[in-house]
Image (cartoon, rainbow, N blue to C red):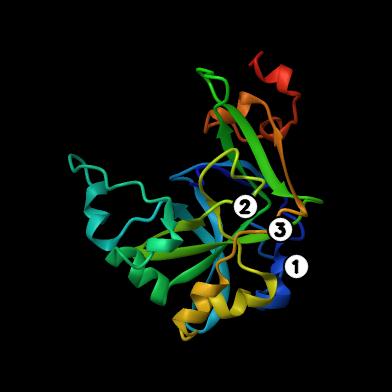
Amino acid sequence: MCGRYTLTRQDGVIDELEAQLAIEPGHAWWKPRFNIAPTQPAPVARVVDGTRVLEMMRWGLVPAWANRAFLPGEPKPPLMINARAESIEAKQVFRDAFHHTRCLVPADGFFEWLNGNGKARPDPMYIRPFPRRVIAFAGVFVQAGDLLSFAIVTGKPNELVAPIHIRQPLVIPHAQYAAWLDPTTDLDVARAMMQTPAVDDWRADPVSRHVNKALHDDPSCIELVTPAQTSLF
């Protein structure tokens, strides 16, 4: 799964997406994020009336039928932060979103937790392209009233992530951004776009357990530590 990720740059994100998405510049209205967690808002690219836009959405897909669960006294809807690529069309909410409302989730890394040697507290690992750059996770979204919410599509891990976790977020190649967002794109073509990133320009390093708390959102979350240091937090 993918339960935390980063978008540590504000400047340049629009520029890096603009070439493929034709998004108007000057919309950097979010702060750099070092620990994006479920239920929090994050910038997401989607198509609105034929125009590609970047706007804030809630991470954790909330289908229209579950919107009432936000009312007082109602049970909370399930926290659908990830959609499995292999079975994305098995559930109607994910199937409809994959067919009609795909999105791109800008990011520059994500976290997974390595639970080795029977440790009571697993060690966080920061996994990202190196040198650091903005990428786009495959995503799907829904609109329930005024609420926009999204899920990140995950798949089988590459050789770098496999020793850490059994899933990882899938990445859409730059050249396919526009086609992924286009609801008229053939579904077989869209399925083929969801890719596990290659290992050669990615790395995974242990970071401070400061990231374990979702309320922590500062550069300390991605501060690299030695394996020996992780036992001190």
Return the x and y of residue 35 as percentages of the image width and height: 59, 39
Residue bearing the label numbered 3: 134
Q: Is residue 25 above or below residue 220?
A: below
Q: Amino acid at mark 2?
A: Asn
Tell me, yes or no, whether the two marked residues, 3 and 1, touch with CB atoms within 8 Å.
no
Q: Gap in Å between the C-alphas at discs 3 and 1?
A: 10 Å
Which is more N-terminal, label 1 or label 3?
1
Residue bearing the label numbered 2: 158
Residue extending furthest toward the left = 73
Q: Amino acid at mark 1?
A: Asp
The residue tagged with tag 1: helix, strand or loop? Answer: helix
Query: What residue do we see at 51% from left, 48% from top?
Result: 167
- The answer to whether residue 145 is seen in the rendering is no
Residue 98: mark: none
Return the x and y of residue 133 as percentages of the image width and height: 76, 56
Return the x and y of residue 201 as percentages of the image width and height: 77, 54
- The answer to whether residue 124 is seen in the rendering is yes
Q: How crowded is the residue under tag 1: few (<14 C-alpha within 10 Å), some, or many (20+)?
A: some
Query: What residue do we see at 65% from left, 15% from top?
Result: 231
Tell me, yes or no, whether the two marked residues, 2 and 1, touch with CB atoms within 8 Å.
no
Q: How crowded is the residue under tag 3: few (<14 C-alpha within 10 Å), some, or many (20+)?
A: many
Q: Gap in Å between the C-alphas at discs 2 and 1?
A: 28 Å
Query: What residue do we see at 30% from left, 47% from top?
Result: 78
Tell me, yes or no, whether the two marked residues, 3 and 2, touch with CB atoms within 8 Å.
no
Foreground tag (2 vs 1): 2
Residue bearing the label numbered 1: 15
Foreground tag (3 vs 2): 2
Query: What residue do we see at 38% from left, 64% from top?
Result: 88
Which is more N-terminal, label 1 or label 2?
1
Q: Is residue 201 left or right of residue 181?
A: right
Q: Is residue 11 left or right of residue 93?
A: right
